[in-house]
């Protein structure tokens, strides 16, 4: 509609009606936005979803409904930085969640973890940014000598980029509930989750990552989503099941995702009512 045809108050009224119409197209706000990158990571959560309704936003799929006492939106984000950040922004803008739960599979970075163990994220971070030392042509490359660059977010008050070298803390209240929640297939530990668009199976590299970043597990999404949650002022927690364990020679096992999905359902059923977002 070309509003220039209308003048004065009529134009203002039509503009207001268009804004109200646009707002009405958005879904109702939810208590929790639950994310999984791949179908096996959300399948059991969808089974537990009551009054399910499917919503397509562009190329991304969401389902809304209830689990326990909470209204929930479930997001199939897709794997990796580009997909998970796009899906998260869509989910935040569409559903205005009070809490984001990112869950799924991961690779163990420390030898005490075994298949089906779950790490609940005390902190999550992006470990995929580096600067390399100067080397002449033919001198080769040595990833263990690279210097990490911390994740940075713009401070809206100053416009400056602020570094977060240790990543972002998980929501304390959500972590407390998670630590009381049973993993039906293994153990539960609080720990540090690292995210990058990488799959590291070289034990020297795995040991270096664990030492350099304090990481317990690695995956591709949660550290980036944690940064978005921080930027929007939304509570956040991540759960990651061990789906491959290089110290034990255990290759990727996709169905380990069932452990975190079932754990997440129990977590939501145990989660007390959430206060309104300030």
Image (cartoon, grey):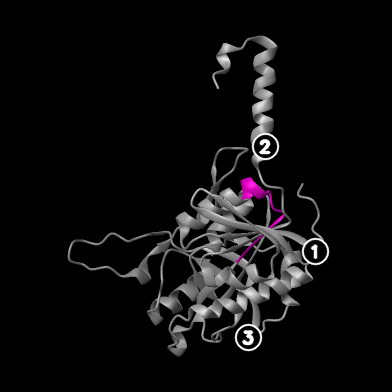
* Residue extent of the magenta highlight: 92-102
Q: Return the residue at label 2.
A: 23
- Residue at the image position 58 percent from the left and 65 percent from the top: 124
Q: How far apart are marks 1 and 2 (CA)?
A: 26 Å
Sequence-wise, the earlier of marks 3 and 1 is 1
- Residue at the image position 58 percent from the left and 54 percent from the top: 227
Left or right: 198 in relation to 221: left
Q: Where is residue 152 in the image (x, y as percent from the top left)?
A: 52, 51
Q: Return the residue at label 1.
A: 69
Look at the numbered disc 3 and give the secondary structure of its residue: loop
Sequence-wise, the earlier of marks 1 and 2 is 2
Q: In which quarter of the image is the N terminus?
A: top right
Q: Which mark is residue 161?
A: none
Q: Where is residue 160 in the image (x, y as percent from the top left)?
A: 54, 41
* Residue sitting at the far bottom: 248
Q: How far apart are marks 2 and 3 (CA)?
A: 43 Å
Q: How far apart are marks 3 and 1 (CA)?
A: 25 Å
Which of label 2 and label 3 is nearer to you? 2
Q: Return the residue at label 3.
A: 185
Q: In which quarter of the image is residue 149?
A: bottom left
Instruction: Decide: is 202 above or below 33.
Output: below
Q: Position of residue 31 (x, y in %)?
A: 74, 56
């Amino acid at each position: 509609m070309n509003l220039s045809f209308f003048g004065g108050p009529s134009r203002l009224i039509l503009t207001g009606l268009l804004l109200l119409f646009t707002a009405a197209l958005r879904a109702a706000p939810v208590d929790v936005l639950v994310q999984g990158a791949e179908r096996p990571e959300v399948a059991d959560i969808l089974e537990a979803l009551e009054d399910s309704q499917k919503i397509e936003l562009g190329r991304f799929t969401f389902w809304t409904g209830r689990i326990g006492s909470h209204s929930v939106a479930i997001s199939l984000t897709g794997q990796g930085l580009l997909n998970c950040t796009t899906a998260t922004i869509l989910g935040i803008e569409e559903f205005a969640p009070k809490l984001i739960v990112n869950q799924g599979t991961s690779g163990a970075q420390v030898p005490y973890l075994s298949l089906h163990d779950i790490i609940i994220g005390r902190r999550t971070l992006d470990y995929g940014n580096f600067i390399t030392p100067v080397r002449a042509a033919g001198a080769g490359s040595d990833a263990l000598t690279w210097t990490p660059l911390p994740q940075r977010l713009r401070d809206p008050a100053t416009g400056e980029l602020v570094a977060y070298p240790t990543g972002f803390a998980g929501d304390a209240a959500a972590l407390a509930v998670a630590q009381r929640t049973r993993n039906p297939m293994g153990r539960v530990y609080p720990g540090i989750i690292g995210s990058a668009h990488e799959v590291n199976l070289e034990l020297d590299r795995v040991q270096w990552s664990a030492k350099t970043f304090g990481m317990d597990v690695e995956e591709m999404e949660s550290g980036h989503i944690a940064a978005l949650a921080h930027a929007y002022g939304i509570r956040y927690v991540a759960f990651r099941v061990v789906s491959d364990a290089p110290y034990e020679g255990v290759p990727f096992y996709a169905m380990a995702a069932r452990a975190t999905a079932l754990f997440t359902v129990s977590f939501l059923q145990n989660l007390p009512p959430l206060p309104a977002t300030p």
